[in-house]
Image (cartoon, grey):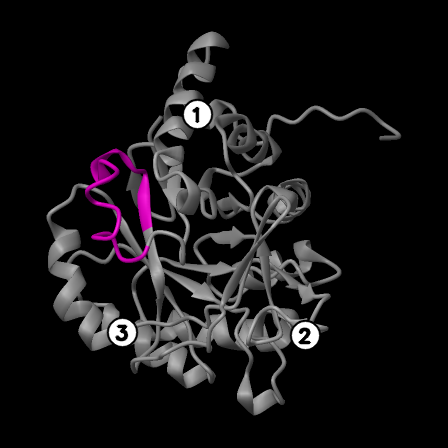
Amino acid sequence: MSIDIAGINMKNPVMVASGTFGYGPEYADLVDLNRLGAMVVKGILMEPWNGNDVPRHVEVPGGLVNAIGLQNPGVEKFIEEYVPFLRDYEVPVIVNIWGRTEDEYGQVAARLSDVEGIDGLELNISCPNIKQGGIAFGTDPEVARKLIALVRERTSLPIIPKLSPNVSDIGLFARVAEEAGADAVSLINSIPAMVIDTETRRPVLANVVGGLSGSAVQPVAVKLVWEAARAVDIPVIGMGGIGSSEDALEFIIAGASAVAVGTANLSDPLTVIRVIEGIESYLSRHGLATVRELVGTLETTSGR
């Protein structure tokens, strides 16, 4: 079950996705954290950030629409209050980082570079670039290239851009990330969505729009992971709607070297353990010695 992602040695290919597992303590009494392949903690900015007004999430058929707004304690409080806790576990820690400008990303990356217990950085490039009129960093290939290259200069840690699904050619963005110095890519981030209260004729979310995650996005995510994996040589981490080992196996067969369980953690924290056990069982049933033998083994026929 072990796998190496960008130099990060994982005992299995199953991670928990940023934004759905807090910073670790929130789930420590519910899940054996040492069984995880890796933990991706909630997004960190240089300064504390309160996120959006409430209501910030709403359940919908097949998932969740949220507009939490990347609430976080800021990098210094994260290092002081959470990193010591995380060091007590034998599981790699990947920190999701974000910023409103390229330099803010670079500042967070540089600050975390020499912190003991941090194994990698996931770059949330779906944030709006205030210098570009609000355009997301991850929806313009040259903006994305510049940002990833800047972070690459500021840190020696493995960097993993988290790609947006809101582009016409995911393979292009994966290649841009690879060329700019990324060690791996992860995808997908949530899909823009909106929910309306028909009685009041007002948006349910205070932010008006949010991001859709959950089982409804899983087939979309699998398709995008397949396209990204065909475009690059660096590892691809697949996520989006994983609620079972079968969901996770689809991503791996499509080309993902590892997967991340996200929204399902919120309804059942033990989902991630069942996914790990299900993949182990699958490898045994199919006579596969390692999970690496399964990565990218999708068989297609011409014309389909």
Foreground pick, 153 / 114: 114
What residue would you read off at disc 1?
Answer: 291
Sequence order check, earlier mark of 2 and 3 = 3
Magenta: main secondary structure equals: loop
Residue 42: % across, % down:
35, 61
Q: Which residues are magenta?
A: 22-39
Name the quadrant of the C terminus: top right
Relative height, residue 190 to residue 298 (above, below):
below
Separation (CA) of disc 2 from disc 1: 48 Å
Residue 228 locus on image (x, y percent): 63, 48
Q: Residue at x 55, y 91 (%)?
A: 131
244 left or right of 268 in image: right
Compare marks 1 and 3 and give the one earlier in the sequence.
3
Q: CA distance from mark 2 to mark 3?
A: 31 Å
SS class of the residue under badge 2?
strand
**Residue type at numbered disc 1:** Val
**Three-letter amino acid code of the residue under disc 3:** Pro
Residue that badge 3 annotates:
73
Q: Secondary structure at mark 3?
A: loop
Residue type at tag 2: Arg
